[in-house]
Image (tube, helix red, strand yellow):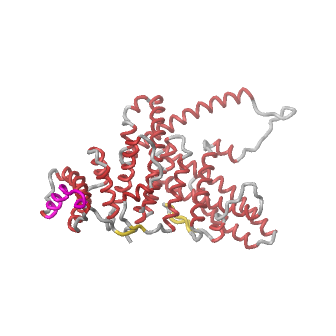
């Protein structure tokens, strides 16, 4: 099944709008007007002068195929540039959305076109009304009136939860470098592609438009702050960057180099600030001297895990927050579909044992000290660490040539290595305790999860 519903009718009025948009782009592409079949010319003439009921009549299959041929020649970036430069009417944009959603089959660029065009429509409406938009399901359903969509599948519902998890993660970003180094844009693109035919469902489109809006606003705010900071740090460099608003209108893939350059400058400024703080801290400690016991002997104090990581230049609080978010996101996915036996990531699938999946089904209060709560917390923490490793390992290898980008993923893996080893001890201790209580099956389950975690830790440890 290509489209999650029946094909809606494209009217004569919509046909005229579609032909006007697409033929103008093709004309520029070819350097002249493409030859239009005589039957299509006649249909266009009738459509241009049609009014009332005449304009609402459906177009012929032949006319529809002609528009599809024009669409085939138009790449997504061409469509974006054309719609923005010609100040296309909302009626024409809606006609384009209806056409792209109704197409059978959907081609490679159709999803990307719909993603941008639907978002652009609501941006136009927001600018016109002067107020922020909201959730767009009812508006999109009105645009797609006449389509008969099927209910979303369980995997589709799960992926909607993943979009919510991405937006939750977005809330914690305080610097532009965190956006680029987290790869949230690439992860969002990957997730959109996983919807398949259900991408064109109104509920999914509403979630994607909301995601695009919130991500765009966060990027714009942090990008402006970064450019301001970089301008103070290296005034000459800031002259090479375009206007923030103009930059955000481009395709991300076309400006990824600019984003990486800004990230590198942002991180450099941040590291310089950290070095200054460390120098001040060192000077203060030198004045204060070491802690001493009675009698003048120096008091030795073992470092905590957090202190060890901080000494390595790693922010354990930030990485711990990312781990908690991932565990919550996995829990939402499994509770929405208790039959889940694996978690999909760009690097592959993480297979879950029965007890590992069930451990996510119930959220126990942090104050509960029962065996079931300890079991669930230890297992879900282990799976969360493995899932985070599955996310960070590909990014670690992809960014190895870019020092600042690579360091972010390197730091994440070092944190996960330390935290994973600690969690391995927790699993082992709980397994021994379970054996003493006569819970041999639970002990075996804990040791099996520990073995899975240990295998991942071995892979990560081999990198350093």
Q: In the rendered view, does 429 fall on the left or right side of 419?
A: right
Depicted 262 relative to depicted 412: above or below:
above
Q: Quadrant of residue 379?
A: bottom right
Depicted 32 relative to depicted 219: above or below:
below
Q: In the rendered view, does 213 fall on the left or right side of 450?
A: left
In the image, residue 351 lies at what x, y percent? 57, 68
In the image, residue 38 lies at what x, y percent? 12, 63
Asked whether the viewer can see residue 202, the reply is yes
| Direction top: furthest residue | 287
In the image, residue 113 lies at what x, y percent? 34, 55
In this view, the residue in front, 183 or 245, is 245
Q: Is residue 52 magenta?
A: yes
Q: Residue at x 47, y 52 (%)?
A: 135
| Direction left: furthest residue | 38
**Which region is colored magenta?**
39-55
Q: What main secondary structure does the magenta stretch of the protein show? A: helix
Q: Quadrant of residue 366?
A: bottom right
Asked whether the viewer can see residue 458, the reply is no
In this view, the residue in front, 87 or 271, is 87
Q: In the rendered view, does 84 fall on the left or right side of 433?
A: left
In this view, the residue in front, 426 or 157, is 157
Q: Is residue 156 magenta?
A: no
How many numbered circles are shown? 0
Q: Quadrant of residue 300?
A: top right
In this view, the residue in front, 258 or 425, is 258
């Amino acid at each position: 099944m290509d489209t999650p519903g029946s094909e809606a009718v494209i009217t004569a009025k919509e046909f005229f709008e579609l032909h006007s948009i697409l033929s103008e782009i093709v004309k520029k592409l070819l350097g002249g007007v493409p030859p239009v079949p005589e039957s299509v010319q006649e249909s266009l003439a009738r459509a241009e002068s049609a009014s009332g009921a005449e304009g609402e009549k459906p177009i012929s299959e032949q006319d529809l195929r002609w528009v599809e041929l024009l669409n085939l020649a138009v790449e997504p970036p061409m469509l974006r540039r054309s719609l923005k430069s010609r100040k296309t009417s909302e009626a024409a944009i809606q006609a384009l959305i209806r056409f792209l959603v109704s197409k059978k089959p959907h081609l490679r660029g159709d999803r990307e076109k719909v993603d941008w065009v639907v978002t652009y429509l609501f941006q136009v409406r927001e600018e016109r009304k002067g107020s922020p938009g909201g959730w767009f399901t009812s508006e999109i359903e009105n645009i797609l009136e006449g389509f008969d969509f099927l209910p979303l599948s369980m995997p589709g519902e799960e992926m909607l939860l993943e979009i919510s998890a991405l937006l939750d993660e977005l809330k914690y970003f305080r610097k532009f470098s965190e956006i680029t180094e987290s790869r949230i844009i690439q992860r969002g693109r990957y997730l959109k592609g996983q919807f398949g035919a259900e991408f064109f469902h109104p509920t999914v489109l509403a979630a994607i438009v909301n995601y695009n809006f919130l991500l765009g606003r966060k990027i714009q705010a942090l990008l402006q702050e970064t450019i301001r900071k970089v301008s103070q740090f290296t005034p000459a460099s800031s002259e090479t960057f375009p206007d923030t608003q103009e930059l955000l209108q481009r395709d991300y893939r076309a400006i990824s180099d600019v984003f990486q350059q800004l990230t590198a400058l942002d991180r450099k400024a941040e590291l310089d600030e950290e070095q200054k703080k460390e120098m001040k801290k060192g000077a203060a400690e030198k004045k204060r001297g070491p802690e001493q016991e009675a009698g003048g002997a120096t008091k030795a104090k073992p470092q905590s895990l957090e202190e060890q990581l901080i000494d390595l230049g790693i922010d354990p609080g930030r990485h711990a927050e990312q781990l908690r978010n991932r565990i919550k996101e996995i829990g939402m996915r499994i509770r929405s579909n208790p039959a889940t036996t694996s978690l999909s990531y760009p690097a592959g699938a993480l297979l879950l044992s029965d007890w590992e999946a069930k451990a996510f089904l119930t959220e126990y209060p942090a104050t509960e000290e029962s065996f079931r709560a300890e079991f669930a917390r230890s297992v879900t923490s282990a799976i969360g660490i493995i899932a985070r490793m599955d996310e960070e390992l590909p990014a670690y290898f992809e960014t190895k040539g870019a020092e600042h980008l690579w360091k972010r993923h390197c730091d994440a893996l070092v944190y996960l290595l330390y935290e994973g080893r600690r969690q391995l001890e927790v699993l082992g201790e709980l397994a021994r305790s379970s054996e003493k209580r006569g819970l041999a099956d639970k002990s075996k389950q804990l040791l099996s999860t520990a073995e899975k975690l240990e295998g991942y830790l071995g892979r990560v440890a081999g990198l350093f």
